[in-house]
Amino acid sequence: TQLLEQSPQFLSIQEGENLTVYCNSSSVFSSLQWYRQEPGEGPVLLVTVVTGGEVKKLKRLTFQFGDARKDSSLHITAAQPGDTGLYLCAGDRGAQKLVFGQGTRLTINP
Amino acid sequence: DAGITQSPRHKVTETGTPVTLRCHQTENHRYMYWYRQDPGHGLRLIHYSYGVKDTDKGEVSDGYSVSRSKTEDFLLTLESATSSQTSVYFCATGDSDQPQHFGDGTRLSIL
């Protein structure tokens, strides 16, 4: 069983559309991280959210940490082909126990 | 670019042979990690190091060993490779107790 469930696992949309990716768990995390990974490369850290209810914005990307610190979402506004990639969430359970979700493979079509 | 180099980038070997993967960093980060990435599982922690000669097990450590004799190098060894260890292996580093920077991975195939 996956401790962190990401949904959807695959998403293909047209340029200009909005989308939301979800990361859910029954466990509480001290923080949650979002990464983006491109083919043949390692994950790149986008953001870390720490406080329940916290919202962070990175240009067209909005990250939210659930009030109970069990879930998170990533919202992309006006998606562009450059947003294509694998998006990973990871929850911090402390003491190097960073748990990753399975990933959401996002494709933005021109 | 966090100055992480993984070698080799690709390797094909046979079941039962020993394999060593190398991670080299130039940022002097205290913490180093080895993960494996498999479809449907995300990344799973194999071993990590919190200093020279200080290492500990992660979630999927069976069949793997590590060594860190210098701050900049973290080696992952498969003593006797099995087909279930076919995967993409990522090294990561950080100056806190969570990984912040990842290398570009080693694709390992065990036939």
Image (spheres, coloured by chain):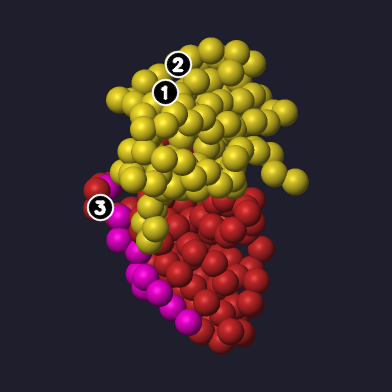
Chain colours: A yellow, B red
| Rendered view: B17 above or below A82 | below
> Looking at the picture, do discs 1 and 3 lie on one chain?
no
Residue A48 found in image quarter: top left
**Residue type (three-letter) at the residue carrying disc 1:** Thr
Bounds of the magenta segment: B2-12
Location of residue A52 in the rendering, given as x and y in whole percent from the top left corner: 55, 14
Please name the residue shown 39% across and 26% down the image: A77
Q: Is B81 covered by the magenta stretch?
A: no
Tell me the mark number nearer the camera, choosing from 3 and 2: 2
Tell me the mark number nearer the camera, choosing from 1 and 3: 1
Q: Nearer the viewer, residue A14 or B98?
A: A14
Q: Is B8 covered by the magenta stretch?
A: yes
Please name the residue shown 56% across and 80% down the image: B110
Location of residue B100 in the rendering, given as x and y in whole percent from the top left corner: 39, 40
> Looking at the picture, do discs 2 and 1 lie on one chain?
yes
Please name the residue shown 48% across and 62% down the image: B89
Q: Please, what secondary structure does the residue beneath circle 3 have?
A: loop
**Residue type (three-letter) at the residue carrying disc 3:** Gly
Chain ID for label 1?
A
Query: Quick check: marks 2 and 1 in contact, CB under 8 Å?
Result: yes
Chain ID for label 2?
A
Q: Nearer the viewer, residue A30 or A4?
A: A4
Q: Please, what secondary structure does the residue beneath circle 2 have?
A: strand
Q: Please indicate whether residue B107 sits to the left or right of residue B95 in the image.
A: right
Mark 3 Cα shell of 10 Å, populated few (<14), some (14-19), many (≥20): few
Tell me the mark number nearer the camera, choosing from 2 and 1: 1
Gap in Å between the C-alphas at discs 1 and 3?
28 Å
Location of residue B105 in the rendering, given as x and y in whole percent from the top left corner: 40, 61
Mark 3 lies on residue? B3
Mark 2 lies on residue? A55
Q: Please indicate whether residue A21 sits to the left or right of residue A4 in the image.
A: left
In the picture, the disc for residue A62 is 1
